[in-house]
Image (tube, coloured by chain):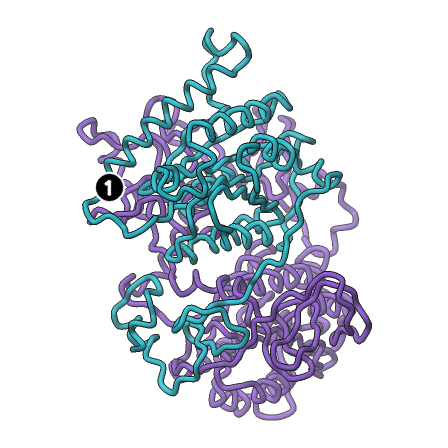
Chain colours: A cyan, B purple
């Protein structure tokens, strides 16, 4: 773990940044295995959870960022709520729900407009790397705000599968979170486990959970994810179970125990190649991402 | 001599320690103080004037009113100069970097290291910053190795061998902080040359010399040693603490390293940390080699086995070498039994941002900003901080040339130094070209 000089934190005040997966492919009912939970029911669980966070401590803050299919954006920020008359009746509950819903609707409309005609095949992944980057920029602003600030953490409510094209960006975000000591918790509501989020929780010291019963999502959220970081040392939270850190080779995409690494570009291969053309080709074409290398190797 | 006779209180915003101090109106006459050797006699408030020079944080504007220097914009301007120099050879050409580095840090513990111009002494300051540097180095280059060498009494000694664990180096360094005698550059170079010749050919060989002395006592011809190092392709860099020395400059020029001299403690820290990111690769190393590495799995909880690094039985945890099935405690490490390098995929991922750097953001010209015909964003895309300073004038900010999102200065620095992702580019699936 990287060492950072200690900062003064308010004792149990937390800033929770929630990354909400709004991928329409996930919620559309096409993969029926996840749908013991529909999107409206999911939102009711999330609203109750956010309200409970705000009620735990007067100074707690909640920020919600939506992870969409084509874009990411801020949906709600509890510290910027206006002090108008409506927000004072019944606490802040109605104001949170209505404001969040309104912003979410606008975001989804904008996100849909960005759909190009060439729709991605199968169930596409949502842009988790974008929302993680936004969350980390916001948290850095909070760190700069003064010596006394809430303890930040990130909670990913993710259901879409991992997009391999986002691997580098997500790992960069994870390492940056580790340096700033911001834990990334993950609650996976999709059908399969997410290897990226397992690694994120393990490296940053957060909690990873895939609830077996999605009907009781609020219960999982409030027992596992709502406590602040100081109190977590007193609780028995789900432990990381066998995070698989083995790499997969670039030529066949299978996980390997032993492989060969290029000393220049750090690509992983399972066969010993005499001539490495990958590096030369990439440098020549100047492409920024490690595109599918097996097509170049053929 | 500065004399604050106005009787007003002023709070300097920029202080090196983050504490806030107040200058009262009585004024101080600045004595011609000798900085060395005066440390013990002064009270804390006196040291604030001798060391911190808080009057230098003020400047006058055209009407003669005193203002604090706007450090935020200065800091950002400095950062941008640094970024520009790194990207000076046009962003379209990609410079290959040496990712697997074998670095020897040579620390000068001669008589000159006990000088007090860096407080409390040069040696203590060097040790403190070398510790931070080692941690930062392994953070940015997880596959690399560091070794420590000290120069004392004219002799160079190897403090630790090339290894990948930061704690063992730091512990060894902190235990051996005594200085005496002369310093010998040639002996250090000879020793390092001998060790670096044994490493495999794909590794980049580097030496970083932290030199406090003003001279060197050599047993032979140092020019010959420099030529030897140049032939073995060892890249030598020097960070000087006293003054510029010709032989160090010649050494760095011949081997392709960088020579810098520190002005004060914070400048020294900055110069030292500049060596943490990988340097451009020397042409001869540009040939790619395939290195065999293992990706161990974590052993199941409750399994009892004898750990090969501590030579004692341990329960649970640990990793199993895929070739010889020996148990190791932490990664990355070289298996003690079969010699296979064991890493995990996050270690490789830590170096990816060196391979795919993001382009620097461009400044948004103020004429464009204040033009009412252009509807530009009023808040930073990353942190939602408003750009509008009081008075409804938009303050200085930057934009990404690929996704056209606007960011504030602090997000710019954070994104380029720590995050290495542009939030705008990552948040858009389809880039409009």
Nearest the camera: A97 or B284? A97
Look at the image and tell me in which quarter the C terminus of chain A lies: bottom left
Nearest the camera: A232 or B394? A232
Residue at 66 percent across and 45 percent down: it is: A238
The residue wearing badge 1 is: A115
Name the spot of residue B83 as percent of width and height, x first: 39, 56
Name the spot of residue A215 as percent of width and height, x first: 54, 32
Name the spot of residue B130 as percent of width and height, x first: 64, 64
Q: Residue furthest right?
A: B312
Name the spot of residue A77 as percent of width and height, x first: 46, 27
Q: Label 1: few (<14), some or many (≥20) within 10 Å?
A: some
- Image quadrant in which you'd find residue B24: top right
Is residue A148 among the parts visible in the rendering? Answer: no
In this picture, residue B1 sits left or right of residue B365 = right
- Image quadrant in which you'd find residue B98: bottom left
Look at the image and tell me in which quarter the N terminus of chain A lies: bottom right
Nearest the camera: A198 or B225? A198
In this picture, residue A26 sits left or right of residue A241 = left
Q: Is residue A55 above or below residue A85?
A: below
């Amino acid at each position: 773990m990287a060492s950072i000089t200690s900062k003064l934190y308010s004792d149990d005040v937390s800033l929770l940044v929630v990354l909400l997966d709004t991928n329409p492919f996930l919620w559309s009912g096409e993969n029926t295995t996840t749908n013991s939970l529909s999107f409206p029911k999911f939102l009711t669980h999330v609203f109750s959870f956010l309200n409970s966070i705000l009620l735990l401590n007067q100074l707690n803050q909640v920020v919600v960022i939506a992870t969409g299919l084509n874009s990411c954006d801020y949906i709600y920020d509890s510290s910027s709520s206006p002090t108008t008359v409506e927000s004072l009746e019944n606490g802040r509950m109605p104001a949170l729900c209505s404001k969040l819903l309104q912003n979410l609707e606008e975001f989804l409309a904008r996100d849909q407009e960005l759909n190009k005609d060439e729709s991605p095949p199968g169930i596409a992944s949502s842009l988790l790397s974008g929302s993680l980057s936004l969350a980390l920029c916001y948290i850095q602003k909070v760190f700069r705000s003064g010596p006394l600030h809430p303890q930040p953490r990130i909670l990913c409510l993710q259901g879409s599968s991992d997009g391999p094209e986002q691997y580098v960006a997500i790992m960069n975000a994870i390492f940056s979170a580790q340096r700033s000591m911001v834990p990334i918790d993950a609650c996976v509501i999709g059908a399969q486990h997410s290897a990226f989020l397992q690694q994120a929780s393990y490296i940053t010291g957060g909690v990873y959970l895939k609830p077996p019963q999605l009907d009781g999502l609020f219960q999982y959220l409030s027992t596992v994810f709502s406590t602040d970081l100081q109190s977590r040392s007193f609780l028995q939270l789900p432990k990381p179970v066998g995070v698989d850190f083995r790499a997969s080779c670039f030529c066949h995409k299978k996980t390997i125990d032993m492989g060969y690494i290029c000393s220049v570009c750090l690509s992983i291969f399972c066969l010993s190649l005499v001539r490495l053309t990958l590096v030369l080709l990439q440098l020549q074409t100047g492409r920024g991402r490690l595109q599918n290398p097996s097509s170049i190797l053929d | 001599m500065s004399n604050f006779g106005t009787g007003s209180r002023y709070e300097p915003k920029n202080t090196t320690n983050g504490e806030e101090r107040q200058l009262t109106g009585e004024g101080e006459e600045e004595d011609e103080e000798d900085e060395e050797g005066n440390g013990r006699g002064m009270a804390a408030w006196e040291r604030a004037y001798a060391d911190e020079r808080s009057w230098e944080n003020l400047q006058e504007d055209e009407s003669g009113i005193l203002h604090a220097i706007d450090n935020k914009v200065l800091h950002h301007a400095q950062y941008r100069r640094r970024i520009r120099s790194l990207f000076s050879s046009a962003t379209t050409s990609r410079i290959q970097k040496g990712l697997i580095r074998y670095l020897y840090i040579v620390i000068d513990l001669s008589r000159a290291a006990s000088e007090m111009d860096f407080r409390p002494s040069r040696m203590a300051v060097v040790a403190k910053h070398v510790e931070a540097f080692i941690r930062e180095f392994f953070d940015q280059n997880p596959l690399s190795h560091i070794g420590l060498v000290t120069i004392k009494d004219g002799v160079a000694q190897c403090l630790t061998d090339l290894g990948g664990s930061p704690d063992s180096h730091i512990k060894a360094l902190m235990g051996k902080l005594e200085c005496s005698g002369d310093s010998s550059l040639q002996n250090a170079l000879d020793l390092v040359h001998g060790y670096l010749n044994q490493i495999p050919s794909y590794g980049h060989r580097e030496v970083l010399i932290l030199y406090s002395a003003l001279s060197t006592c050599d047993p032979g011809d140092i020019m010959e040693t420099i030529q030897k190092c140049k032939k073995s392709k060892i890249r030598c860099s020097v960070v000087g603490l006293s003054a510029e020395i010709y032989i160090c400059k010649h050494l760095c020029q011949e081997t392709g390293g960088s020579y810098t001299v520190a002005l004060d403690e914070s400048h020294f820290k900055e110069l030292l940390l500049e060596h943490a990111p990988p340097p451009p690769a020397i042409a001869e190393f540009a040939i790619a080699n395939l290195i065999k590495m293992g990706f161990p799995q974590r052993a199941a909880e409750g399994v009892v086995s004898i750990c090969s690094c501590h030579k004692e039985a341990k329960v649970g945890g640990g990793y199993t070498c895929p070739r010889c099935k020996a148990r190791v405690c932490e990664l990355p490490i070289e298996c003690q039994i079969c010699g296979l390098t064991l890493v995990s995929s996050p270690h490789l991922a830590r170096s990816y941002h060196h391979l795919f750097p993001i382009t620097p953001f461009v400044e948004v010209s103020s004429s464009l900003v204040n033009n009412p015909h252009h509807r530009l964003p009023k808040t930073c895309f990353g942190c939602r901080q408003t750009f509008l300073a009081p008075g409804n004038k938009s303050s200085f900010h930057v934009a990404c040339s690929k996704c056209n999102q606007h960011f504030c200065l602090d997000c710019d620095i954070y994104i380029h130094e720590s995050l290495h992702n542009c939030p705008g580019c990552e948040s858009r699936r389809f880039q409009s070209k």
